[in-house]
Image (tube, rainbow, N blue to C red):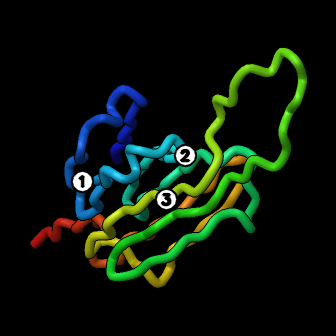
Amino acid sequence: MAIIRRSDRDRGNAEWDDYDGFNLSRDAEELDGCCCPSVDVFEDNAAISLSVELPGLEKKDIKLEVEENILTISGERKFEHEDKRANYHRVERCYGDFSRSFTLGAIVDQDHILAAMDRGVLTVTLPKREESRARQIEVQVR
């Protein structure tokens, strides 16, 4: 079991290392925009799970697709209203299009990927193929 965490100060790194057949690399384009959502990656024997911070978004605002072993999470956070109060000086929250892509290794069962949204966190479960899971082998006594 492993947990990989990245902080904002680490976002300048051009690429993360391959981890167990699941590539965590980031494209330079992703680093340029402020709307790149933070992702936590967790792995256990059965699956790899992604927890993606998407506060304020709904199911209709998010798109997930897998193509040629690439999982892409994309969408748009819209700036829906303008605040015209006299003391309003700047907007620090990110608005606009976002996209995160992950290369899926051979260990991921792409036909059974699940996604669920709860309180602004999208959880994507990438189940491992049965043959790639760790298993215990019983020692036979003769």
* Residue 134, percent from left and from top: 28, 64
Q: Are marks 1 and 2 in contact (CB under 8 Å)?
A: no
Q: Quadrant of the C terminus?
A: bottom left
User: Residue at left 42%, top 64%?
Assistant: 46
* Residue 32, percent from left and from top: 40, 44
| Identity, as a three-letter code, of the amino acid under mark 1 | Tyr
Mark 3 secondary-structure assignment: strand
**What residue is shown with label 2?**
35
User: How much space separates mark 1 and mark 2, taking CA atoms?
Assistant: 25 Å
- Left or right of 141 on screen, residue 130: right
Q: Please state which of residues 84 and 30 is positioned toward the viewer in this rendering.
A: 84
**What residue is shown with label 3?**
99
Marked residue nearer the N-terminal end (3 or 1): 1
Query: In the displayed image of the protein, which residue is found farthest to the top?
Result: 87
Q: Please state which of residues 12 and 33 is positioned toward the viewer in this rendering.
A: 33
User: Residue at left 90%, top 23%?
Assistant: 85
Mark 2 secondary-structure assignment: loop
User: How much space separates mark 3 and mark 2, taking CA atoms?
Assistant: 8 Å
| Identity, as a three-letter code, of the amino acid under mark 3 | Ser
- Left or right of 50 on screen, residue 119: right
Determine crowd level at label 3: few under 14, some 14-19, many 20+ residues with C-alpha closer than 10 A.
some
User: How much space separates mark 3 and mark 1, taking CA atoms?
Assistant: 21 Å
User: Residue at left 64%, top 64%?
Assistant: 62
